Image (spheres, rainbow, N blue to C red):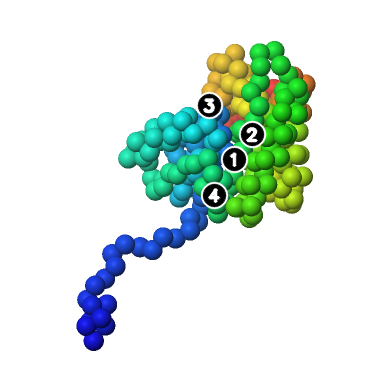
Amino acid sequence: ITAILKDQLIVNLLKEEQSPQNKITVVGVGAVGMACAISILMKDLADELALFDVMEDDLKAEVMNLQHCSLFLRTAKIISGKDYRVTANSKLVIITAGACQQEGESHLNLVQHSVNIFKFIIPNVVKYSPNCKLLIVSNPVDTLTYVAWKLSGFPKNRVIGSGCNLDSARFRYLVGERLGLHPLSCHGWVLGEHGNSIALQTRCVFTVCYITSGSFTLYV
């Protein structure tokens, strides 16, 4: 009777641990990885952010910075580790880890070193997050996206490369700077390999002025 009464009187005010609904993992905490992490936090894209890196000291320092800033952010949980279990149950895994590019070295020369790294990363990510989507940012991104797709066994719509998005953003900025316009008013795309072999395809759209019936748009 005492035990039953105790159960009725005592209420657990703490919620039970639940699996995250929108967990994002960033593999690699270099400059690109941390830029991704900060963007995720600022845009409130995840209810849990996990950071993974084999360089434990660098990882601890970067995570500590993010955790101290979490007072100003809405993401409830920021975790890290060099054990792949920290990546478990991720909805999206962003891969930024890879071989370091030397000065003057082309992206394609990095292939073999980065492929060897991916042979270890991808199977472990898939093991703990079999239903995730992979976003590949490591260079050479085109080749490594293909490698990640093959290693993961995922359908092709679940393995995505960042492609030429960065090149396109740079291109739009430079066009806007040259013409004295905001980059959002310039629409251009860089096609092909993210590297030295690229092609430019541009359709720059500038809003010139507004009148009562709408706006004039100039196509260049």
Q: Assign the N terminus to one quadrant of the image.
A: bottom left
Q: Assign the C terminus to one quadrant of the image.
A: top right
Nearer to us: label 1 or label 4: 4
- For label 4, the crowd category at 10 Å Cα-Cα, with few meaning under 14, some 14 to 19 and many 20 or more, is some
Q: Is residue 186 left or right of residue 21?
A: right
Assess whether mark 1 and mark 3 are in contact (beta carbons under 8 angstroms).
no
Q: Amino acid at mark 2?
A: Val
The kind of secondary structure element at disc 4 is: helix
Residue linked to disc 4 = 85
Residue 49 percent coordinates (x, y): 48, 44
Q: Earlier in the sequence, mark 4 or mark 2?
A: 4
Q: Earlier in the sequence, mark 2 or mark 3?
A: 3
The kind of secondary structure element at disc 2 is: loop
- Cα distance between the residues tagged 1 and 4: 16 Å
Residue linked to disc 1 = 94
- Cα distance between the residues tagged 2 and 3: 12 Å
- Cα distance between the residues tagged 4 and 2: 21 Å
Q: Residue at x 58, y 27 (%)?
A: 185
| Number of the label disc, if any, that sits on residue 213 | none
Residue linked to disc 2 = 137
Q: Is residue 189 left or right of residue 30?
A: right
